[in-house]
Image (cartoon, helix red, strand yellow):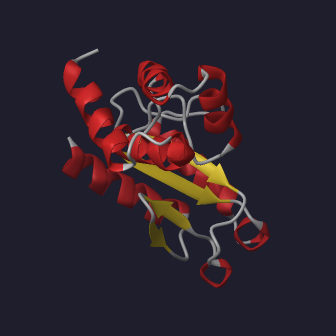
């Protein structure tokens, strides 16, 4: 692993005075920087904060927002809460999977451009069906409109 990643973590740790009480905030910043929590960086944090690596893994796996696997540049969340589900969120999910070559078990494209996830609720029931892309809300989606967005992002992101 290159040294610049450790330097980034050192800056994050310094921001929190190398205080293990801020472990969650430290992990959040690392995740924001790399879009996941690389194992070698969690080991580094454990060493620097004098915390058991098992504790860091337990925190990282307890909170749904943390990821131990790399995610794409565009993180897409498809709501499948009640309001979105009855307004046909599953056909939207299926059209996105087809367009991106993803499945139930494969969530990120090989080019690391897209990660597709389903969530229980995005809190925008009146706008259903809803997706978010990097936390930007897209309302009243259809299978066709989502594919159009994906194609636009793909042309911009490459």
Q: Who's the residue at 55% across and 36% down the image?
A: 67
Q: Position of residue 105 (x, y in %)?
A: 64, 28
Q: Who's the residue at 47% across and 42% down the image?
A: 19
Asked whether the viewer can see residue 63, the reply is yes
Q: Residue furthest top?
A: 1
Q: Residue furthest bottom?
A: 126
Asked whether the viewer can see residue 73, the reply is no
Q: In the image, is 42 to the left or to the right of 148?
A: right
Closer to the camera, 147 or 17?
Answer: 17
Q: In the image, is 58 to the left or to the right of 73?
A: right
Looking at the rendering, in which quadrant would you find the C terminus? top left
Q: Quadrant of residue 114?
A: top left
- Residue 31, relative to residue 122: is it above or below? above
Closer to the camera, 51 or 130?
Answer: 51
Q: Who's the residue at 39% across and 26% down the image?
A: 110
- Residue 55, relative to residue 124: is it above or below? above
Q: Quadrant of residue 26?
A: top left
Q: Quadrant of residue 56?
A: top right
Q: Position of residue 86 (x, y in %)?
A: 77, 70
- Residue 28, relative to residue 45: is it above or below? below
Q: Position of residue 58 (x, y in %)?
A: 69, 31
Q: Position of residue 5 (x, y in %)?
A: 27, 28
Q: Who's the residue at 23% across and 30% down the image?
A: 7
Looking at the rendering, in which quadrant would you find the N terminus? top left
């Amino acid at each position: 692993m290159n040294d610049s990643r450790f330097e980034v973590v050192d800056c994050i740790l310094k921001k929190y005075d190398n205080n293990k009480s801020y472990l969650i905030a430290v992990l959040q910043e690392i995740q924001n920087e790399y879009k996941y929590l690389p194992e070698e960086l969690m080991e580094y944090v454990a060493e620097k904060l004098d915390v058991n690596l098992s504790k860091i893994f337990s925190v990282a796996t307890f909170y749904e927002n943390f990821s131990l696997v790399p995610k794409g540049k565009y993180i897409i969340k498809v709501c499948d809460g009640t309001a979105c589900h009855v307004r046909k969120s599953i056909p939207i999910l299926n059209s996105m999977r087809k367009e991106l070559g993803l499945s139930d078990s494969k969530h990120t494209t090989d080019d690391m451009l897209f990660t597709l996830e389903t969530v229980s609720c995005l809190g925008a029931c009146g706008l259903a069906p809803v997706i978010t892309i990097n936390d930007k809300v897209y309302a009243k989606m259809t299978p066709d409109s989502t594919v159009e967005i994906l194609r636009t992002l793909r042309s911009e992101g490459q």
